[in-house]
Amino acid sequence: MPIDCGWLESFTKLVDVVCGWVWGLPLVGAILVTGLVLTLCLRFTHIFNLKRAFVYMFHTEEGDEVSGEVSSFAALCTALSATIGTGNIVGVATAIGTGGPGALFWMEVAAFLGMATKYAEGLLAVKYREVTPDGRVLGGPFYYIENGLGRRWKPLAVAFAAFGVLAGVMGIGTITQIHGITSAVQRFFDPQFNPADMATGIGLLGTTYSVPVVVAGIVVTLCVGLVVIGGIKRIAKVSSVVVPFMAIFYIAVIVLLLLGNLTKVTAAIQTIVLAAFNPEAVTGGVVGTVFIAIQKGVARGIFSNEAGLGSAPIAAAAARTNEPARQGLVCMTGTFIDTIVICTMTGLAIVVTGAWEPSLGLEGVDITIEAFNRGLAFIGPHSGIISSFFLMTALTFFAFTTILGWNYYSEKCLEYLVGTERQWCVKAFRVFYVAVVFVGPYLTVSVVWGMADVFNGLMAFPNLIALLLLSPVVARTTADFFRRTRQESFRQD
């Protein structure tokens, strides 16, 4: 559905150049090094307490003295609503399609290290958050940069907030999500649509689009507008219902696919590991190099789980808890669920079925659709229609909740920039945000993903600096929390 304009081609090339610079070796290395440093500082404590983290997820602290606006589970669902989206369905496919199966391996490595990063982000968000007189909670990287590192670091906090607004309205929060929804809708309802046929489409912005794309874009835009008006509590309420339901349903279908192709799973895992270190042996040199595999795996992994971006702690700060480490553990489960569970299963489905192979000429969501069509063929003659409908539905709900979550993130970034008293700016921003959702379907795939990667990377730079500088605080707070919990457990025994 590209717009046939010369200026857009030039802009696409510019975005590709900037994206290559932003996601070069320095940022990829910084993300991995930060995760490694935090993992070592924590001495793998967060990994050993993964079970405890899931327990805390469903048990919110009670009492009038407990600060926060929503439960720990609702805060996590808000964060998951922003992470479980096109990255799990389209992002994984894009990474494997351009970087080869080995990109999935590096996505997992980044996610394992990213669990420590996400833990630290959640901990610092609660530790350095602020509460307004009317009970609203303000927190996120801009606050732990300013309050944790000191006011002389405020320019770094401002830079993060500015990049966060741009990422929300021009990258991960709007355009990629609505584009993923409308692309899936068109492939299901009108796969043979020809943009050159004016009689069967709707003319917009100098080209023709299928009726399902335009209708889907309008419906999603209206739904987004109705929800974002209610702020964090309405977003959390919607996310707490939609996210768990769709995540469980999606995982169940992929488990069915993998069970139906169980004999191929071992070979697929071997292919993924081999391609991570020797892509040519698997792809014949057609797809990527080792660095491309690492770059695409880390970039798409961060796009999916957002560990290191600094987005999730904005939601974590709203949780009802007085224990920073406790919310850090809950926050960490988001990376585990998003990447180590959902992205891994999607990637396995793609590799098991061979849907990633360059000879097929597929990209983006088409790779995942092909994987499901092939992998679920055993369920009957209508498997293609069933799998396409399922993916369209899953992508629609996942992407919709991501749009909601990123509205909250970018609003908080804007609020930090303009001040909490200028609520008219926030209301105007909501209108603009919804407008961007409306125009999202009419941009090209390369521009959409390129801009998302650029703004994600720019957000990560100031946040990673803060996490490294505050790593001693993370280690001390963690040690103190587990020392006190051990003492309480000993007294109860």
Image (cartoon, rainbow, N blue to C red):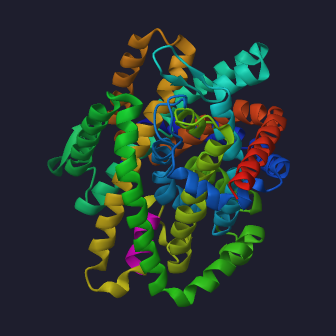
Q: Position of residue 367 (x, y in %)?
A: 46, 66
On whether residue 372 falls in the magenta region, the answer is: yes
Quarter of the figure that contains the C terminus: bottom right
Residue at image coords 47%, 84% = 259
Q: Which residues are magenta?
A: 366-374
Q: Give the quarter of the image for residue 55.
A: bottom right
Q: Residue 38 location in percent, x, y?
A: 80, 46
Residue 283 visible: yes
Q: Residue 443's x, y, as percent?
A: 40, 40
Classify residue 344 as left or right of residue 411: right
Identify whether 105 is placed above or below 2: below
Question: Magenta span has 176?
Answer: no
Residue extending farthest to the bottom is 263
Query: Which is more toward the observer, 228 or 265?
Result: 228
Q: Is residue 179 something that shows in the picture?
A: no
Residue at 60% in and 45% down? 306
Main SS of residues in magenta: helix
Farthest residue toward the top?
A: 421
Residue 483, percent across and down? 79, 47
